[in-house]
């Protein structure tokens, strides 16, 4: 009984199709991560400004992504934009928009936190040494802030990869959708197939996220000051 | 963008039920997650043999897999090998499984933040392990854990939106259904966002306040 389901995994191209689905997932996550990092660093540096007019709008932007679940954001962009502005958005584009905006918000907070947590004397000493603003950032602040922000950034990337599972709910064909298709085809013949397919996808996600979170912890320990 | 205000009044009862269910499931899930988290963190803190390894494996599995897949596995996978659970029960188990690992991490970090010298001092003045826990470690660990704990609560409440994948009629799923019936996309999604704001905005503000309050308990202040 139990074994009949697992055989489906290796039948025909099923195994390859699941991996292809996983690849789609990772592709979207990777593009979103690159955009988020670039945008996040820029916004993060802007947010270190003490001007309230700069701080408040970005704070609201960040809190909106913290308070409203990502699934809701996906639905909002996926349904509202085409219905009201007559724009055709593919589910992939919706995913990229939401993930990039979310990632940028979170990374900006990491970057800002890393910069303002640097002791004040670092800035003062570099000024005393006669470094210009660019030199101060290039040689003093950025190298130290990088070390503080990379481990949380990797954690965020792990979270983003995990969150890509939600994309199946807006009809994006990724690993879970492929799994569901395989289950639908084989369900009658092999009743236990859903146990094995979902178990396998579970395992796939673990294989990707576990090394990442391990790596981030290693870096954190290594750079701990 | 046109909004039909009359529609809000019509569907309000649906949202009320859904909001209540969301809060209920999240609260039960968080409660169990706290229990699981405390047990795991104590096991890790004292490095209890064998159990420590089991907890470690659990933490890694729970933290490195998406909730949606955990739920699909519970809801669609397990019945095939003879274990059938209702949707809501799956939701609570999933949330506890995920939340327990996050809570454990926060509590453990809180206990480890209590400095070694205090524990040594406690032992030197003759406190037993239990007394050490009760009078030295827990009060301080509590105040260190509050920010992380609050973030976890908010995270777990948000994660209940994923329950819509296993046919639980919480906020997100209700909205999806209503959109399917009435095609009032703007109104339904606006209600959804408002629903989450009603739960999470006061909680966020409360947690910020609480964080400031408990800082008094920290050593040296």
Image (cartoon, rainbow, N blue to C red):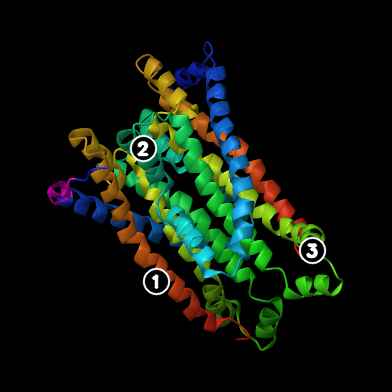
> Disc 2 to disc 1, how far (Cα)?
34 Å
- For disc 1, the marked residue is B206
Residue placed furthest toward the bottom: B125
* Numbered label attached to residue A81: 2
Element carrying mark 3:
helix
- For disc 3, the marked residue is A136
Q: Percent from the top left, x then y, of residue A169?
A: 39, 34
Depicted A129 relative to depicted A15: above or below = below
Element carrying mark 1:
helix
Report the side of B22 relative to A217 (left or right): left
Q: For the N terminus of chain A, which image quadrant?
A: top left
Residue B40: tell me if it is visible.
no
Callout 2 crowding tier (Cα within 10 Å): few <14, some 14–19, many ≥20: some
Element carrying mark 2:
helix
Residue B177: tell me if it is visible.
yes
Q: Nearer the viewer, mark 2 or mark 1?
A: 2
Camera-side residue: B114 or A93?
A93
Callout 1 crowding tier (Cα within 10 Å): few <14, some 14–19, many ≥20: few
Camera-side residue: A124 or B145?
A124
Q: Are marks 3 and 1 on the same chain?
A: no
Question: Which is more N-terminal, label 2 or label 3?
Answer: 2
Q: Chain of mark 2?
A: A
């Amino acid at each position: 009984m139990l074994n009949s389901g697992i055989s489906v995994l290796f039948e025909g191209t099923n195994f390859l199709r699941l991996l292809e689905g996983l690849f789609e997932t990772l592709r979207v996550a990777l593009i979103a991560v690159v955009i988020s990092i670039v945008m996040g660093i820029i916004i993060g540096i802007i947010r270190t400004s003490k001007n309230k007019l700069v701080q408040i709008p970005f704070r609201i932007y960040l809190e909106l992504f913290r308070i409203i679940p990502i699934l809701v954001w996906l639905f909002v962009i996926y349904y509202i934009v085409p219905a009201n502005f007559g724009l055709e958005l593919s589910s992939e584009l919706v995913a990229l928009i939401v993930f990039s905006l979310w990632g940028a918000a979170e990374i900006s907070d990491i970057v800002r936190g890393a910069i303002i947590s640097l002791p004040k004397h670092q800035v003062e000493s570099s000024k005393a040494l006669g470094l210009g603003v660019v030199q101060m950032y290039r040689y003093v602040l950025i190298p130290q802030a990088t070390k503080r922000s990379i481990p949380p950034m990797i954690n965020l990337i792990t979270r983003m990869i995990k969150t890509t599972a939600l994309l199946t709910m807006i009809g994006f064909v990724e690993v879970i959708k492929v799994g569901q298709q395989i289950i639908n085809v084989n369900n009658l013949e092999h009743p236990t197939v859903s146990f094995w397919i979902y178990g396998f996808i579970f395992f796939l996600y673990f294989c990707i996220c576990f090394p990442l979170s391990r790596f981030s912890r290693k870096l954190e320990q290594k750079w701990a000051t | 963008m046109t909004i039909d205000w009359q529609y809000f009044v019509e569907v309000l009862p649906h949202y009320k039920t859904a909001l209540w269910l969301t809060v209920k499931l999240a609260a039960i899930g968080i409660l169990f997650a706290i229990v699981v988290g405390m047990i795991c963190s104590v096991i890790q803190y004292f490095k209890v043999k064998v159990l420590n390894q089991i907890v470690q494996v659990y933490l890694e599995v729970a933290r490195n897999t998406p909730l949606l897949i955990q739920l699909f596995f519970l809801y669609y996978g397990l019945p095939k090998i003879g274990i059938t659970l209702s949707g809501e029960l799956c939701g609570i188990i999933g949330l506890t499984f995920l939340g327990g690992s996050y809570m454990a991490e926060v509590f453990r970090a809180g206990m480890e933040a209590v400095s070694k010298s205090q524990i040594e001092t406690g032992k030197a003045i003759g406190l037993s392990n239990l007394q050490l826990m009760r009078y030295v470690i827990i009060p301080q660990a509590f105040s260190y854990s509050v920010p992380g704990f609050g973030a976890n609560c908010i995270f777990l409440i948000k994660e209940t939106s994923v329950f819509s994948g296993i046919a639980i009629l919480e906020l997100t799923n209700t909205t999806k259904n209503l959109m399917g019936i009435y095609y009032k996309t703007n109104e339904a999604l606006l209600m959804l966002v408002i629903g989450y704001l009603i739960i999470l905005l006061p909680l966020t503000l409360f947690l910020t306040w609480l964080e400031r309050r408990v800082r008094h308990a920290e050593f040296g202040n």
